[in-house]
Image (cartoon, rainbow, N blue to C red):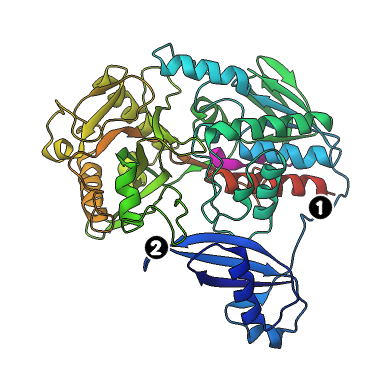
Amino acid sequence: MIIIRNIIQESDDPIKLKKKIGKLIKRDDFSYEIYRKSIDSRKGIKYNFQVLVDLKLSEKEVKKIKNSEIYEVKDLEIKINNPPKEVSIVGTGPAGLFCAYVLAQNKVKVKVYERGEEIKDRIKTIENFKNGGKLNTESNIQFGEGGAGTYSDGKLTARSKDPRVRYVLETFHKNGAPDEILIDNKAHIGTDLLRDVITNMRKEIIKNGGEFYFSHRFDDINIKSDEVENIIINGKEKQSEAYVLALGNSARDTFEMLSQKIQMENKNFAVGLRIEHKRQTINKAQYNGKETDNQGKLLPQASYNLTYNNKEMNLSAYTFCMCPGGYVVNASSEEEKLCVNGMSYHDRDGENSNSAIIVTIDEKIYGNKILDGMKFQREIENRTYKIGNGKVPVQRFADYKKNTPTGKLGQIKPSVQSPYTLANLRGIYPKEIEEMIIEAIESMGEKIKGFNDDDAILSAAETRSSSPIRMLRDENNKSLGINNLYVIGEGSGYSGGIVSSAIDGIKTAQFILEKE
């Protein structure tokens, strides 16, 4: 098997693609599959393919083929030594879910505990909150089956060449995700389809002997010498041979408890605002005014990934969790604290596109005591709550620059799927972060026409981009000095996004299965 990259053509016609591959390899009789497909719009609309060709060639022969190399197809390698009979997993985000999935498939009993509700109930709870109902601090956009990623764009981007990436995509596909996630370079599932995929994965785990306990809160952990004796769930002791903490990055009360039990440190993270533009504005800018490819096929909704650095201020900003044709949601999980996030449905047909515009911060800004970053997040969210009087505060970019409240919206209307109010967002963040956000948006407007539109909508506050702490662990993902405790996923500070968190869960399952 060989992989050939950067095969560029003006259409995604499979017949033309095969002819082009045939010319490159100088053969007519071969089979291939598309490994990745992306759109290159720098000089007209073109498709860029990576393909896997089923051929056995020598390295010398492969070197003669442009942009090619020998590709070794690897299945997920599982080595089973003497694994524990039962493992307790806390959290049903991608890390916990994939860890449970792999363990259950290999006949290890898993008990999965989740403080939030299962999806069918969680949907009702969140819809009630969106419509102005009371916040449920145990089940919301942050907590519940599938984790925070369930209410996002369902992005499956990963720069890693780790073969586990393919396993993640194939597992999602097997459990109901659409075919295109296997080849699209910027694949996404969408929050509406992702719910069914996660439910199907849970059913598969149960079929293999796993157990799920929703509305079960992780209260405490008892550690003696170098072993976990038990964990406390809803006030009751639960005992297994090994324990996996697959927490989300919003498990603040749990972080407070664990800071007295395990080794952890502060880490850099990013905070900022959400920014919204007309979806058609972003599409037009990214596709140079084109709506279709050269064969008249509608182009997918455009995305972007932008960065900005200010060397004098020693700060960097970037866009994050970009949601084409998406919506802004109130992602709060604590009383009198407000934060926002972005999400998209599979069709991405909302009027606006949005993303976070965030600035990376460190201990110089938030303090050097353990959990100071988390406290900083809480302070920001409390200010945001007060400014909006409990509603999501929004502001035109022009008014944000002038430091004046927005009294009237322009051409762009907020896509916020919950009560919102016009406000002045200045004063939520320290001055250097606010200045950095303005500079970044203006600079990004030079790369994407209309990005710095006066009518662009800003909403506050984007604070949950990643964990403010890192739980220290060894090369086998075990909490330092504790033999049977694994700390993984976004909450542990070692992953970000659905795919990287899922990979962290898979690796941990492998470590557990291979443990002697």
State yes or no: residue 463 in magenta. Answer: no
State yes or no: residue 482 in magenta. Answer: yes
Please name the residue that numbered disc 2 is placed on: 41
Query: Which corner quadrant of the image does residue 502 belong to?
Result: top right
Which secondary structure, mark 1? loop
Cα distance, mark 1 to mark 2? 41 Å
Q: Nearer the viewer, residue 292 or 216?
A: 292
Q: Residues within 10 Å of mark 1 (few under 14, many from 20)?
A: some
Q: Which mark is residue 78?
A: 1
The reply, left or right, for residue 72 in relation to residue 425 is right
Give the percent coordinates (x, y) of residue 99: 71, 40
Q: Nearer the viewer, residue 28 or 398?
A: 28
The reply, left or right, for residue 266 in relation to residue 415 is right
Q: Residue at x 41, y 15 (%)?
A: 131
- The stretch in magenta equals 480-492
Could you tell me the amino acid type at mark 1? Ile
Could you tell me the amino acid type at mark 2? Ser
